[in-house]
């Protein structure tokens, strides 16, 4: 019974991963939604060993990050403007030098391309995948904070 249960779980997990890869990005998707999709992709990437799946996840992540870069107008959200007018400080977990979304997206794009290249030693690829995971999660949190979605 345990073996069959594990097989069903693995099968349903594979279906969810495939759905994540195959679902097209909405043309109207905004930064917070794209950041969430990127975080989901990189979380699965970090847990996946299958070469074809990793490649597909990286390609989808490149597409999603590229769309994020296109969406970023680098203009503060109305919520942030209101905070600044009222004299409130904008607190974030992101260092001041990384508070431009395009810089974070460019770093994540470069890391994704390095992981996708497939020419790195396994230990380096694993470390870069972990760094990519952390970078994308930090980016997603920053997007939510700066868009007013996270309080």
Image (cartoon, rainbow, N blue to C red):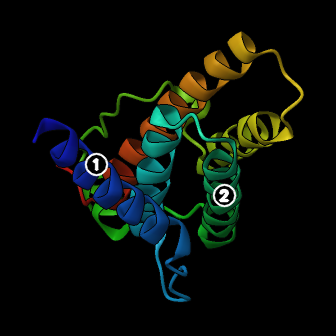
Total numbered labels placed on residues in the image: 2
Provide residue 144's location: percent of width, then percent of height.
33, 53
Label 2, secondary structure: give it.
helix
Q: Quadrant of residue 118?
A: top right
Q: In the visual, does 140 lie left or right of 71?
A: left
Label 1, secondary structure: give it.
helix
Q: Residues within 10 Å of mark 1 (few under 14, many from 20)?
A: few
Q: In the visual, does 128 lie left or right of 90?
A: right
Tell which residue pokes out farthest to the right in this image: 119
Q: In the visual, does 36 lie left or right of 97?
A: left
Which residue is labeled 2 in the image?
56
Q: Residue at x 50, y 33 (%)?
A: 46
**135 to 45, vertically: above or below:** above
Provide residue 4's location: percent of width, then percent of height.
20, 47
Q: Earlier in the sequence, mark 2 or mark 1?
A: 1
Q: Residue at x 31, y 40 (%)?
A: 90
Provide residue 101's location: percent of width, then percent of height.
59, 49
Q: Residue at x 44, y 61 (%)?
A: 37
Q: Quadrant of residue 131?
A: top right
On-image quarter of the N terminus: top left
Q: Quadrant of residue 44?
A: top left
Provide residue 115's location: percent of width, then percent of height.
75, 34
Cα separation, mark 2 vs mark 1, equals: 22 Å
Tell which residue pokes out farthest to the front in this image: 1
**103 to 60, vertically: above or below:** above
> Foreground: 2 or 53?
2
Q: Residue at x 40, y 68 (%)?
A: 33
Which mark is on residue 7?
1
């Amino acid at each position: 019974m345990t073996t069959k249960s594990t097989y069903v779980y693995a099968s349903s997990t594979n279906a969810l991963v495939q759905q994540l890869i195959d679902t097209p990005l909405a043309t109207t998707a905004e930064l917070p939604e794209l950041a969430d999709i990127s975080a989901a992709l990189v979380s699965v990437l970090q847990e996946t060993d299958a070469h074809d799946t990793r490649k597909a996840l990286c390609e989808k992540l490149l597409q999603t990050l590229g769309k994020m870069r296109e969406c970023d107008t680098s203009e503060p959200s109305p919520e942030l403007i209101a905070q600044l007018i009222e004299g409130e400080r904008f607190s974030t977990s992101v260092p001041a030098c990384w508070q431009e979304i395009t810089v974070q997206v460019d770093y994540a794009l470069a890391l994704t391309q390095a992981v996708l290249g497939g020419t790195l030693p396994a230990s380096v690829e694993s470390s870069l995948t972990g760094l990519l995971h952390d970078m994308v999660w930090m980016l997603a949190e920053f997007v939510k904070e700066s868009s007013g979605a996270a309080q």
